[in-house]
């Protein structure tokens, strides 16, 4: 699941920057500043989700819904910043903020204390590998609409895979 998550997350950060620069004419600095609201939402939501991580399945379903909805909105919206980029990127960032701590906790749950660092490293590597593969695959698609629609599909896949997770973590 962390591989899929990484593939979707890169869809937000990389491709929204490309959208802002290549379609809306933002400079690199403006694109970075344009992504700031999403980054702030990610940090705040991840902090809150960390407290709720015992409700694992609910968090994964909620995060997947936010991710899917935001990417679906990006895929369909007219691309102007206020109505077609800001809202959906904040929604996706909220989904990422909910999913990341939940998936990392699930990946390291039940691991003996002496092996927790290794388990965390493997989980982080899976996330990064997913980002690399996601970028490679999404970059082959034609147009931002197709990229964001595919990322929304990854959100649906994450929701479907949540059936494999326990409802609650100990």
Image: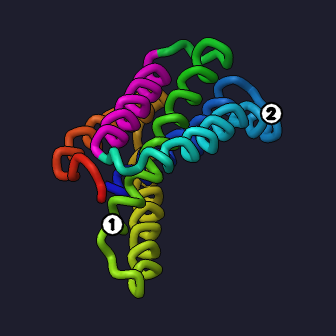
Q: Quadrant of residue 150?
A: top left
Residue at 42% across, 29% down: 66
User: Residue 82 in the image: x percent, y percent?
Assistant: 67, 15
Query: Quick one: which residue is furthest to the front in this view?
Result: 170
For residue 62, above or below residue 99: above
Secondary structure under badge 1? loop
Residue identifier under label 2: 30
Whether residue 16 is in magenta: the answer is: no
Q: What secondary structure is the magenta-colored segment mainly?
A: helix
Magenta-highlighted residues: 57-76
Q: Quadrant of residue 78?
A: top right
User: Residue 79 in the image: x percent, y percent?
Assistant: 59, 17
Query: Which label is found at residue 109?
Result: 1
Of callouts 1 and 2, which one flags the residue occurring earlier in the amino acid sequence? 2
Residue at 59% across, 35% down: 16
Q: Which colouring convention does the figure follow?
A: rainbow
**Quadrant of the frame with the C terminus:** bottom left
Whether residue 73 is in magenta: the answer is: yes
Q: How many marks?
A: 2
Residue at 61% across, 12% down: 83
**Quadrant of the frame with the N terminus:** bottom left
Query: Quick one: which residue is furthest to the bottom in this view?
Result: 114
| Observer-nearest of 109 and 62 | 109
Q: Quadrant of residue 158?
A: top left
Q: Is residue 55 left or right of residue 52?
A: left
User: Residue 33 in the image: x percent, y percent?
Assistant: 78, 35
Disc 1 crowd, CA 10 A, few/some/many (<14, 14-19, 20+): some
């Amino acid at each position: 699941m962390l591989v899929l998550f990484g593939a979707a997350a890169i869809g937000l950060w990389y491709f929204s920057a490309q959208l802002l620069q290549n379609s809306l004419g933002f400079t690199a600095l403006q694109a970075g500043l344009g992504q700031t609201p999403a980054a702030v939402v990610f940090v705040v939501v991840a902090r809150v989700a960390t407290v709720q991580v015992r409700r694992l399945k609910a968090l994964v379903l909620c995060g997947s819904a936010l991710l899917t909805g935001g990417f679906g909105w990006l895929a369909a919206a007219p691309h102007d910043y206020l109505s077609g980029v800001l809202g959906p990127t904040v929604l996706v960032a909220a989904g990422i903020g909910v999913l990341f701590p939940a998936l990392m906790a699930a990946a390291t749950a039940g691991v003996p204390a002496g092996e927790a660092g290794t388990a965390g490293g493997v989980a982080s590597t899976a996330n990064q590998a997913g980002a690399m593969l996601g970028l490679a695959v999404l970059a082959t698609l034609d147009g931002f609409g197709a990229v964001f629609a595919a990322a929304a599909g990854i959100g649906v896949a994450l929701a479907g895979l949540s059936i494999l997770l326990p409802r609650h973590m100990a």
